[in-house]
Image: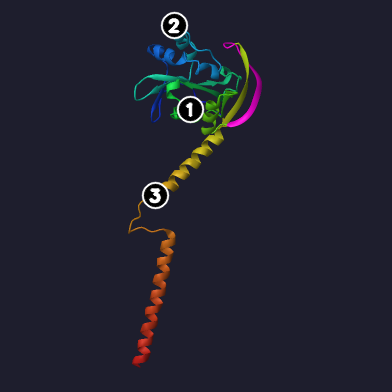
Amino acid sequence: MEQKETQVQIMETKRLILRPWREEDAEALFRYAKDSQVGPPAGWAPHKTIEESREILKGILSEPETYAIVLKESGEAVGSIGLMIGERSHGSLPPDEGEIGYWIGVPFWGQGLFPEAVNRLIRHAFEDLGLSCLWCGFFDGNEKSRRVQEKCGFLYHHTIPVVELPQLGETRTEHISYLPREAYFAMNEDASRQTEEADSSSAPSSPYTMSRKQAHAAADRLFNLFFLVLGIILLLRLLGS
């Protein structure tokens, strides 16, 4: 499958905007990335200074398909999400496959923002970029990331027993999950079908419309009534003669 050209996007969800990082986001980046609950579970060290955050913003966070997760309500960047496509991924994937990475500041955990952002990027990957498969991973103990991947349709693929994390000076076990293009579109078809069924079952009935079953029942009643009336007419004629 031919991959479409990568280009800068600004994407929206109900509560979020996914857009490229900007220099003025440095303070917000440092505010949330300095928390030890954010980086280490994902395999990177907390930011130590705002200057470090500025350098990271100019470097890693300026890579193609890397987005700030921005709250519509406040306009503040509260996390990051990105696609690493082909050789840019940690596993040197084929050019039509990508790896998703993400994090959100601690004050915004437990609000459903993780899957909201990830689902939007998944849609972009398959529908805009034409990728054939997406990959994602989580380290032992990172239950939040595991649940996000499951909610977004990712399936377990394999485990890497030993992964070196130079920033943290340690090794961990990583579990890899994947989402094929076909599975994504199948999930969307099922969701659309369920929505249509829910809409039809909850729609108010009209006195001028009826279901197929109701129509057949009405036709049967008319048919029986016709023969009843015909029988009465024939009976009256016999009595009259």
Which residue does the numbered mark 2 point to in the structure image?
A: 51
Mark 3 or mark 1: whose residue is earlier in sequence: 1
**Residue 100 rendering spot, x and y as whole percentages:** 53, 23
Vertical position of residue 64 compared to residue 126: above or below: above
Location of residue 99 in the rendering, given as x and y in whole percent from the top left corner: 55, 23
The quarter of the picture where residue 71 lies is top left
Q: Which residues are magenta?
A: 155-168
Confirm whether the magenta stretch covers residue 164: yes
- Residue in the foreground of this view, choosing between 136 and 45: 45
Specify the amino acid type for callout 1: Val
Asked if the stretch drawn in magenta spans residue 104, the answer is no
Considering only order in the chain, which callout, 3 or 2, is on the residue closer to the N terminus? 2
Give SS at disc 3. Answer: helix
Q: Which mark is residue 118?
A: 1
Q: Mark 1 and mark 2 in contact? Answer it, CB < 8 Å.
A: no
Answer yes or no: do the residues labelled 3 and 1 have beta carbons within 8 Å? Answer: no
The type of residue carrying mark 3 is Ser
Outermost residue, bottom side: 241
The quarter of the picture where residue 173 lies is top right
In the displayed structure, would residue 214 be above or below residue 90?
Answer: below
Amino acid type, mark 2:
Glu
Colour scheme of the picture: rainbow
Q: Is residue 105 above or below residue 169?
A: below
Residue at 37% over, 12% down: 24
Q: Residue at x 44, y 61 (%)?
A: 213
